[in-house]
Amino acid sequence: MADSDPSTAFSREQRVVHCTRADYVATVRGLLADTFSMCVDLTAVDYLTYAGDRSLPADVVGERFEVVVNLLSIEKRERARVRVQVPVNDATIATLFDLYPGSEAMEREVYDMFGIVFTDHPDLTRILMPEDWDGFPLRKDYDQGSIPVQFSGDFAAKP
Amino acid sequence: MSLIKDIQADGFGGIPHNAITAKLEDLVGWARSRSSWPASFGLACCAIEMMATGAAHYDISRFGMEVFRASPRQADIMIVAGRVSQKMAPVLRQVYDQMMEPKWVISMGVCASSGGMFNNYAIVQGVDQVVPVDVYAPGCPPTPETLIHAIETLHQKIEDGELLKRRTATGGGAHMHVTEIPQGARPMPVILGRR
Amino acid sequence: MTSSKSGILATIEGGNEAEQGLKPRSELTARELMREVGAVLRMSEAEVAKLGDAPDDPADDQTMIINMGPQHPSTHGVLRLMLELQGETVLRCKPIIGYLHTGMEKTGEALTYMQGGTNVTRMDYVSPLNNELVFSMATEKLLGIENEIPERAVWMRMLLSELNRMSSHLLFLATNGMDLGAVSMMIYGWREREEVLRFFQKVTGLRMNHNFIRPGGVAADLPEGWRDDVLRLLELIPPRLEEYDTLMTGQPIWRDRLQGVGVITAQEAMALGATGPILRSTGVAWDLRREQPYLHYDEVDFDVVIGKYGDAFDRYSIRLNEVRESMRIVRQILDRMPGGDYRIQNKKVTPPPRARINESMEALIHHFKLFTEGFKVPEGEVYVAIESPRGEIGCYIASDGSATPYRMHVRAPSFANIQCLPHMMRGGLIADAVAIISSTDPVLGEVDR
């Protein structure tokens, strides 16, 4: 990736590349060709209830979901982070499986936890939750699922 | 043979020196408690402490329990060591059902006893929602001393033998159904586990 | 909650994880068959065609799909493997995880940054201090105080991290031995581990899941006499490691069982995202302590142990020798441990000493606020990675300026390492399956989180 690419930013001295879903595979392929041979981590964030300022670059439209890919270059000892915005009403994005086979389980986890569908993924099924589970746990509109804890001294609690 | 010779030599006074008499219930309870074999059901961090209890420093071999049976059919005690997730709960129940009566369950650690610090969608809030528990051992993880205390508490309960009565009363756990075969009838299949 | 008790019983009676399991051979598409022979690992189709080891598409009734786990005697936790066997040869293997999913990332969003350590430490429960370290480092980076941590705190973190590496590798030696049949190794490994845990109990108060390394430093100072305890450890363990060398490394049975088993090449390991001893066994000298140093690892002298053949024996030897290297580092830390504070003196981040609460109103208020509300962390997102005994563990935190992380994700090394299992097991015998899992050294707590 050229340094003149306007979407490259630095977050706490870490290189971050923003791209759109359309450019996603091309961007990652470019990084792969630039010795970023290991996909260390692929995760997502749900920005539904984000209270702060997302401080995205000017040309990036913030969506509810953001897929974050962490890449590592062993030769250059560098890391790069790719952030892609994914809207909730069309929560699909291309898979990185053909570039990095190690992203298979990570994409399955993102699908399981957020409901983001990775097109052309070889095996997009739930990985952490039981397969008949309803809902996507890490979304912000999904409750923690706590049960009320019985406390004998708590007279104020409703029965 | 030597027992009979001793009795012949000493007369009936020889019997107390050569034979132990007790109630059958006491003897069975004593034997069961001294050689109860655990089924390995180590799930998370508590499993590490359970293995430490089996290792040389804490050594549950002193209590006859060092053989962690892989097959639940050969085990007496199931020590549920660790947090039970939604996906694991049916497996837990299936393993418990495969154990032969008499069987006991120790719920090791706070995650197994009540869900622990994980009061959320993913963890079953206490394994007593899935299997009947006899002894709860608190701790996160319980130190090997705590686990040994829990085991000894259970052994005392086993020796006192009240558990089989409890099992029938509450209907907890898998039943062993015994049906008398009438004379001359065809043998009936025995269904073990959950009916 | 969606699942109730009746739901659990219904699952026993009705379904199984059919969707997540292994499909029979007759239902495989051509693409999946290619993937089975490793075509996905960036081999061209021409190279795949040259592979002679693939059995000639056997008829479906000649292969058998068996299920191993999630409850099984191999001591690596609740990992379920579905294996497709032709006779004794493993053709396909699919690890099915999720049996220990605890919702820790969701829980992390509800806990403050000071409480976060209690949550994160239970992920990789065999090396808990490393989890706490990476979480604390990520928090400190967001706070902007990562260069202001006192020297003593940094060296204490290094000491604890290396001792934790030792105890984790000793556990690996124990479980690896037992999985391969050297049952006495289980007892020996735990015997050594007890010594290290005794030191941890003296310093942190707990044998496991310490919650000791916190944002800003560590929770308490080293106790009196810690040097003697560490020296005792350093005298005790080397002769025992020699014993293990005699018991295992040179023995023909051990070598036959591990050499050539579970071979993986460097290119494959990097494509699959494997790090740690798995990557180092292929000859790639990648250790974050050396390549992207954190704490003061650039000031201590140690070797990065690498292998050559990428097999299980190399991984075993690497971990055995990493114990020796960790002891070397600990010896240097002993000499260089400075005095000073054990946590940063930033009142907004670290609580005041307990004694001051009785004296100063301000200290009381700070204590109260820190433990009830927690400290607020500026907005932003950061990813920090360190070298845990299993590979690269990373923590990605996105903060929205409040006292709890908006999103906390831990990149667990075993999650990626487990993806190597199908590749390592293919073509091997089922008896080697346990050896291969054991050489990967997965901890299911961090796989499932």
Image: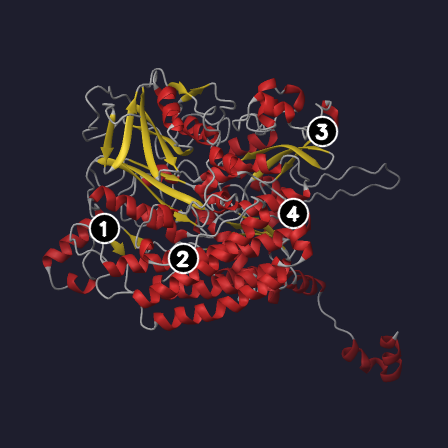
Asked whether residue B116 is in view, the answer is: no
- Give the CA distance from mark 4 to mark 3: 28 Å
Q: Nearer the viewer, residue C83 or B83?
A: C83
Q: Secondary structure at mark 1?
A: helix
Q: Quadrant of the N terminus of chain B?
A: bottom right
Q: Which residue is mark 1?
A: C371
Numbered tag placed on residue C63 in the rendering: 3
In percent of width and height, residue C82 lies at 61, 34
**What is the C-alpha distance between the residues marked 1 and 2?**
39 Å
- Depth check: give the residue in front, A4 or C123: A4
Q: Is residue A102 left or right of residue A149?
A: right
Q: Which residue is mark 4?
A: B72
Q: Amino acid at mark 2?
A: Phe
Front of the two marks 4 and 3: 3
Q: Secondary structure at mark 2?
A: loop
Is tag 1's residue or tag 2's residue first in the polypeptide sequence? 2
Disc 4 and disc 3 on one polypeptide chain: no
Labels 3 and 1 share a subunit: yes
Q: Position of residue B168 (x, y in %)?
A: 62, 47
Q: Which mark is residue C302?
A: 2
Residue sitting at 74 percent across and 34 percent down? C87
Disc 2 to disc 4, C-alpha distance: 46 Å
